Amino acid sequence: MITLKCPHCGEQFDFEPVTRLSPEELHEKELLQGTLNCVACPKCGEGLNVPVRIIYRETESPYMLVQEPHPLPEAQMRAMAMQLDESATNAAIGQGVQRPIVRLVFTRQDFLEKLYLRRNGLDDRVIEFAKYQLYNGGTEDGQLSQAKHRLLFDFSRVDANTLSFIVYNRSNGRPIRMLEVSRSEYEALVEEIGSNAELGQEIDKCLPGRRVDADALGNNMPREQ
């Protein structure tokens, strides 16, 4: 339980945010509608979005997804990811259980993307590497720029043959186009990473802690001369 103060009228009131999610208690409707941890002031009705850390854990497999409420500078994000990874490892050792797969994100969009990649059986490391390739000349028109655009997996359009991505304008956050990748290309990338130990190690080295995203790859992958 936390105490909130309405920025509109100054009323103080108690609110219990949702901070733990699981497949059984997902609050999926609120996540998709963007209303999770939103509350109205009991006095004036002003809507408040309460920023809190949210942790999703699976009960049948060792997987944990953490959303921090605010983006941080790159160095702090890297440090937080490494700290989270270390804490999860130490906890697993102390409990004598398998170390969980841990992911750290900083926006609700990224949280949903990771959640639905997991639900659809897609490897997020491979998806983020595919985004990295698309940013770096992997589209037919070559009009995709990591500095200007952001790719997010479109979990509303999943089929056996195609993976869809929404291209967002980074400056205003608006969607500007759709991008489709054949499922066979994804499977080929899975095989390439799995069979090329050097490539797999390079990707692991460039993903700081458990922050697995194309921006981290873009910042850390060596540039071709």
Image (cartoon, rainbow, N blue to C red):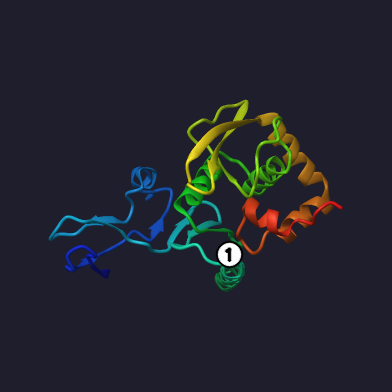
Say which quarter of the image contains residue 99.
bottom right
**Rendered view: 5 above or below 59:** below
**Rendered view: 219 above or below 127:** below
- The residue at the point 87 percent across, 53 percent down is 225
The N terminus sits in image quarter:
bottom left
Residue found at the very far right of the displayed protein: 225
- The residue at the point 75 percent across, 56 percent down is 221
Q: In this view, does 197 lie to the left or right of 98?
A: right
- The residue at the point 62 percent across, 53 percent down is 213
- The percent position of residue 113, horizontal first and vertical second, equals 52, 45
Q: What residue type is labelled 1?
A: Val
Q: Is residue 51 left or right of residue 202?
A: left
Q: In this view, does 6 lie to the left or right of 138?
A: left
Say which quarter of the image contains residue 201.
bottom right
Dot 1 alpha-carbon crowd within 10 angstroms: few under 14, some 14 to 19, many 20 or more: few
Foreground residue among 104 and 61: 104
**Rendered view: 100 above or below 149:** below
Residue found at the very far left of the displayed protein: 43
Mark 1 lies on residue: 97
**Rendered view: 144 above or below 218:** above
Dot 1: element: loop
